[in-house]
Amino acid sequence: MDNREIREALQKAITLFRKGYERQTAGRLEEAIRCYRESIQTFPTAEAHTFLGWSYSFQGRYEDAILECRRAIDIDPEFGNPWNDIGAYLIELGRYDEAIVYLERAARAKRYDNRCFPHFNLSRIYVVKGMLRRATTELHRALQANPEYAPARVALERLETQLH
C-alpha cells in the first residue's frame, strides 16, 4: 500500500469504528461487533480491538474480550484502555492477582485519559482482599485523576466509615 491507500484505509476504518461505537451505545451489540470487525479488517487499530473486546464483555465473553485487548496492546502498548479493560475483565473472572499487573500498567500508560478507572479497579481488588488502607489509597488516586468520579467518592466515603 502506498501512503494514499493507507490514509484511505485508515479513514474507512475510523468511520466503521464510529459506526460500531454508535451501535454499541444504542445497545445493538451484534451490529457493533460487525462494524468493529470490519474496521479491524480494513485497518487494525488499538481502539477497534479494545472496543470489540468491550462489546464482548457485555455478552459475558470475557476471554474473547481479553484476547481483543491483548491484540490492542500489541498494536499500541501505550494506549491505556485495553490494559484497564483486561484488569476489569480479570476481576469479573475472580483473577485478582493477575488483574493487578494490568491495572498498574494502565495507570502508567502514556495515552490514557481515564486514569481514575485503573485506580478505582485496584481499590475493588484491595477491598476483596481485605486490604482496606490500600483500597483507600487507590480511591484517593482515582479522585486525584478525576475529582468528579462519583463511584470513587462513594466508595471512599463507605471505606472511611468502615475504617473509623
Image: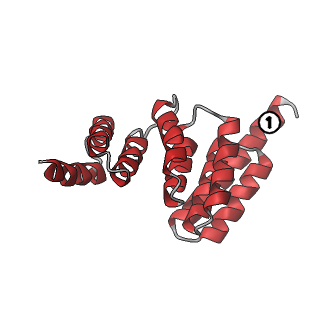
Q: 80 and 91: which one is in front?
A: 91
Q: Is residue 22 left or right of residue 49?
A: left
Name the one closer to the observer, 95 or 5: 95
Residue 32, picture quadrant? bottom right
Farthest residue, direction front: 130
Residue 15 seen anywhere in this rendered image of the structure: no
Quadrant where the N terminus is found in the figure: top right
Q: Position of residue 160 (x, y in %)?
A: 17, 48
Residue placed most toward the observer, 49 or 158: 158
Residue 49 pos. (x, y %): 66, 49
Point 43% across, 43% down: residue: 118
Q: Can residue 78 be spotted in the picture?
A: yes
Q: Which residue extends farthest left?
A: 164
Work out whether residue 13 or residue 33 is closer to the camera in this orientation and state it. Answer: 33
* Residue, disc 1: 6
The image shows residue 105 at horizontal and vertical percentages of 52, 34
Above or below 44: residue 51: below
Q: Reply above or below: 155 against 101.
A: below
Residue at 48% across, 30% down: 108
Q: Secondary structure at mark 1?
A: helix
Counting from the top left corner in percent of width and height, residue 150 is at 27, 52
Q: How is the image coloured?
A: secondary structure
Circle 1 packing at 10 Å, graded few (<14), some (14-19), many (20+), is few
Q: Amino acid at mark 1?
A: Ile
The residue depicted at 48 percent of the width and 42 percent of the height is 100
150 sits to left or right of 90: left
Residue at image x 50%, y 58%?
94
Which quadrant would residue 158 be assigned to in this image? bottom left
Q: How many marks?
A: 1
